[in-house]
Image: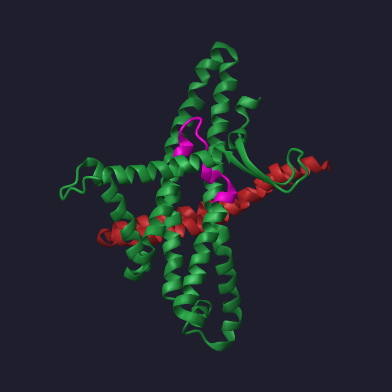
Chain colours: A red, B green
Amino acid sequence: MDPEAAKFIGAGIACIGMGGAGVGVGIIFGNYLAGALRNPAAAASQFTNLIFGFAITEALGIFSLLIALLLLFVL
Amino acid sequence: MAGTDPIHQFNINTFFTFATLGGDGTKGSGVEFAFTNSALFMILAIGLVGGYLIFSTRGRGLVPNRLQLVSELSYEFVANVVRNSAGTEGMRFFPFVFTLFSFLLIGNLFGIMPYFFTITSHVIICVALALLVMTIVIAYGFMRNGLGFLKLFVPSGIPGPILIIVVPIEILSFISRPLSLSLRLFGNMLAGHIVLKVFAGFVVMLSSAGIIGIVGSVLPLGMTVALTALELLVAGLQAFVFTILTCVYLNDAIHPGH
């Protein structure tokens, strides 16, 4: 296979990992919303935890995006 | 296609060079100390934040006017984050955290404006900030707790044999913190601006295809507007996330026991 083509295929495959981060972020915000609707009084105090979990989850998706960007522009 | 190249916007242009260390005089050799567009926008961001805060609080009114209110609200906002995440003892790091937050927020927001350079879309800026945070965490952790800081890697209430597995995981998670802290900010800003530029490129490409193309280019134009709104959210959120994580890591340095 042409190495250039393999690079593009690899970048595409690497981006699949972002789907997992998407599912994770959806679960975090969905569960936060479900909890917030059950107990709205406690929702504001958990906002920091929500953002914290979102950030940790999102970082994993960014890692796979980074691999794709490295494949496309650096390697 | 230089106009629609999505990577072109991240180019660093040298305005003038102060000095070149080493090298043999040819272009590109040695270490160049140059004033670039990145440096210009960093100075602009710091100048804007510092200038605004000094200008708006010069009256020191007991009842704040509108300008002073913005300064006080942003102070209270960051102070609450520090107090909630790192405790009252973490307030000694408040000046650092506030500087970090305002610099990142203004830097990210600058990036959305046309023809403005996004300083946080360069990995070196984000890595430098993240390493600064981690250096402060490690230095202050050892300064305050001595070797007790290493308790961070040994969660309490876990039986001995399991510690063999847990301690390497904790160490690995600590090492990956500066990596994820910097790459999150960098990746978000880079990806967001590439997507913006790609959709803006669609408008140019479509509108060059005759009257049907011009009518059709309304769709990517609307998408660009919507994505700009999303980028506005991301810019604020990522500055906030960086601040919160800094506070959480500082909390580990102040209270290392789990």
Q: Look at the image and tell me whether residue B257 can be seen.
A: no
Residue A8 sits above or below residue B1 on the image: below
> What residue sits 46% from the left and 52% below the top?
A26
Q: Point out the residue furthest to the right here.
A: A1
Q: Is residue B158 above or below residue A4?
A: below
Q: How many marks?
A: 0
Between A46 and B237, the one lying in front of the other is B237
B209 lies left or right of B47: right
- Seen as rendered, the residue at the extreme bottom is B160
- Most foreground residue, B94 or B82: B94
Q: Quadrant location of the C terminus of chain B?
A: bottom left
Is residue B76 toward the left or the right of residue B24 in the image? left
- The percent coordinates of residue B150 (x first, y second) are 52, 79
Residue B96 at x, y percent in the picture: 41, 58
Quadrant in which the N terminus of chain B is drawn: top right
Q: Is residue B118 magenta?
A: yes
Residue A69 in the image: x percent, y percent? Answer: 65, 45
The residue positioned farthest toward the left in the image shown: B63
Residue for point 56% across, 17% down = B207
Q: Give the range drawn in magenta.
A: B110-125
In this view, the residue in front, B43 or B4, is B43
User: In the depicted view, which residue is nearer to us: B24 or B115?
Assistant: B24
Query: With respect to residue B255, does B188 lie above or below?
Result: above
Q: Residue at x 58, y 73 (%)?
A: B171
- Specify whether residue A56 is in view: yes
Q: Which residue is farthest top?
A: B211
Q: Is residue B184 above or below residue B28?
A: below
x then y, percent, for residue B59 = 21, 45
Q: Is B7 displayed left or right of B109 in the figure?
A: right
Q: Does the magenta stretch include residue B104?
A: no
